[in-house]
Image (tube, rainbow, N blue to C red):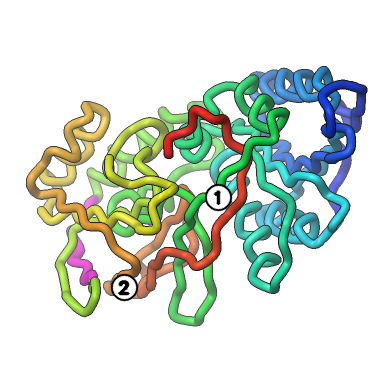
Amino acid sequence: MDGNAHPALSPSASPGAEGLADRPLRIILNPTAGQARGARLKQALDRLTAAGATWSITETQARGDAEALAESLARDASVGAIIAAGGDGTINEAINGVLRAQRTGITPAPFGLLPLGTANVLAGELGIDTPGSAAQALISGSTRKITLGACENSDGAIRYFSMMAGVGLDAHIVAGIDPALKRRFGKGAYVWQTLVEWLRFQPIAYRVTIEGAPHDAASLIIANGHFYAGRFVVTPEADLADPALVAANFTKPGRWAALVYAAALPLGLLPKLPSLTRQKVQSLRVDGPSDEPVQADGDIIGTLPVQISLAAERLTIFAPQRAKS
């Protein structure tokens, strides 16, 4: 699959920071970004150019393109860095492409982010809050290895996630979100969809099996980092450097319990609720109705049943020194 060079942002190189011109940055861009996001991208690219970076952009055309592009770049020894420019979905696709190549024995170039999305959860976890800090992480060349989660469905297909996977209310919200509303209203679209899903909420009992022990869940979030849906916190103990996932089990069923959970999230009270249990895990299995959606990093990746595990692979990623560790 061939991408198109970005029409407004030509490949650039200029003298500057040592080594940047010899370490070409290949940027995978989701072109659905609006004017404001385009300005943020330009700010980051201008900073890279001023520092002497050599970069080029390839646009995605459809869902799945970022994954295919990233896998191809991961197999190209001349690439100095693989950069995903877009939202959490684009970043997740690109990570899956890199890991697909890595599973075959390839050592890919380091991965980087130019966060242009609504929530930018992984970027926040890494301390990349602005276009300037995103560019600076690439300029500095500072990298770290982070853990990943892996979701395996009944046919053996594996999808990786960097921050979280979910079953239950949050997966239904992700499944129901209108992309046009998301582009127009950003996080407001999620607030609206949360209300919609609450109004039509039908309690479902999920069976979660951890180390052979069964647990009932009304909803479940499996976290690799402590941020969720932006800068909210569900699992304060989760950390990208920790070789464990954190299973957050919403144990209390019912519509009113779901409302309490939803209200507690923005108030920072969710981790304090006794009906939210948290446990570090290496793997777990979730069973339930076969049409129940599973989300990973904010995109639907399949339906139940699903096995969710700490991935054996690690991802080398550009991150500033102040990142949480």
Residue at 79% x, 60% y is: 72
Q: Closer to the camera, 21 or 297?
A: 21
Residue at 69% x, 73% y is: 104
Asked whether, in this view, residue 170 is left or right of residue 138, the answer is left
Q: Is residue 172 at least partly visible in the picture? A: no
Q: Main secondary structure of the magenta part?
A: loop
Q: From which residue to which does the magenta span run?
A: 201-208
Could you tell me which secondary element the residue under label 1 belongs to? strand
Residue at 74% x, 43% y is: 28
* Residue 224, above or below 140: below
Residue indicated by mark 2: 285
Asked whether, in this view, residue 19 is left or right of residue 184, the answer is right
Q: Closer to the camera, 111 or 219?
A: 111
Question: Percent from the top left, x then y, of residue 88?
Answer: 54, 42
Give the residue type that dot 2 points to: Arg
Badge 2, how many Cα within 10 Å: few under 14, some, many 20+?
many
Residue at far front of view: 18
Residue at 50% x, 67% y is: 312
* Residue 42, above or below 233: above
Asked where in the image residue 18 lies, by quadrant, the reply is: top right
Mark 2 to mark 1: distance in Å?
Answer: 26 Å
Quadrant location of the C terminus?
top left
Q: Earlier in the sequence, mark 2 or mark 1?
A: 1
Q: Is residue 21 at least partly visible in the picture? A: yes
Q: Which mark is residue 145?
A: 1
Give the residue type that dot 1 points to: Lys
Could you tell me which secondary element the residue under label 2 belongs to? strand
Q: Is residue 202 magenta?
A: yes
